[in-house]
Amino acid sequence: MRPSKGNLIIVSGFSGAGKGTIMKRLVEKYPDSYALSVSATSRSPRPGEEEGREYFFKTKEEFEKMIADDDLLEHACYVGNYYGTPKKYVFDKMEAGIDVILEIEIQGAMQVKKMYPDSLLMFVSTPDAQTLRERLSGRGTETEEVIKNRLCRACEEAMGVENYDYLVINDDLETAVESVHAIAQNERFRIRNNIQFIDNIKNELKSFKEEK
């Protein structure tokens, strides 16, 4: 049984913790259950990234127009660049009964949670801070200055982890993927997500009673 609408799953985590890798693997394993929302950003593409797959790449001016036109579910500025979630894709998927995953920074996550209190919030972390530093350095795509900025940002983000519903430790990829899947599936059985089913079975039971 699938609820009439999909859930909104908000995923944040330290840069380098592997949240993007976890979510892509989740969608690969369970393509009928989840959809990754494609965010817009004003940062430049990294090697291998494609327009409309990893992000919708915008100029600063284009992004600011999207903000002005109220085309974004949320937006935030992170390490000098804009990131945001276009509304239409998210709402269309949820109406189809698909869980939509928003992979966004903590500032944007709090914006969405305020507007949609029933959203499910998950925070992804490495097992420890040293592992985080090693993963950032291992990318080989960023300067030492950028790595330092991301670690400073992680220190700030750590102060807001308590606002999330679940913590996912990414020590082993497949274990982390299954943890996220289990949390999301459990959310589907919350009473508030099954009101239509409850109403239907109430009416059916009432009809049995009236047959007497």
Image (cartoon, rainbow, N blue to C red):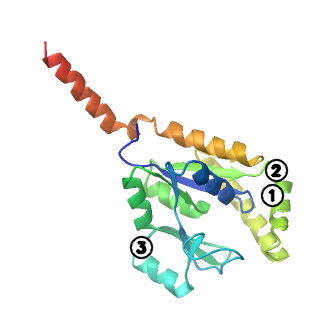
85 to the left or right of 158: left
Instruction: Identify the image quadrant of the N terminus.
Output: top left
Taking depth in this image into account, of 156 and 203 the one nearest to the observer is 203
- Image coordinates for residue 16, horizontal then vertical, percent: 75, 61
Please rate how many residues cluster around mark 1, counting C-alpha atoms within 10 Å: few if below 14, some from 14 to 19, many from 20. Answer: many
The residue that mark 3 highlights is 71
Looking at the rendered structure, the kind of residue marked 1 is Leu
Per the image, label 2 sits on a secondary structure element best described as loop
Give residue 178's position: percent from left, percent from top.
65, 42
The residue shown at (55%, 63%) is 108
Residue at 84% in and 65% down? 138
Question: Which residue is disc 1 drawn over?
Answer: 132
The amino acid type of the residue labelled 3 equals Asp
Tell me if residue 33 comes above or below residue 47 in the rendering: above
Sequence-wise first label, 3 or 1: 3
Please give the residue where the numbered disc 2 appears in the rendered image.
128
- Residue at position x 85%, y 74% from top? 144
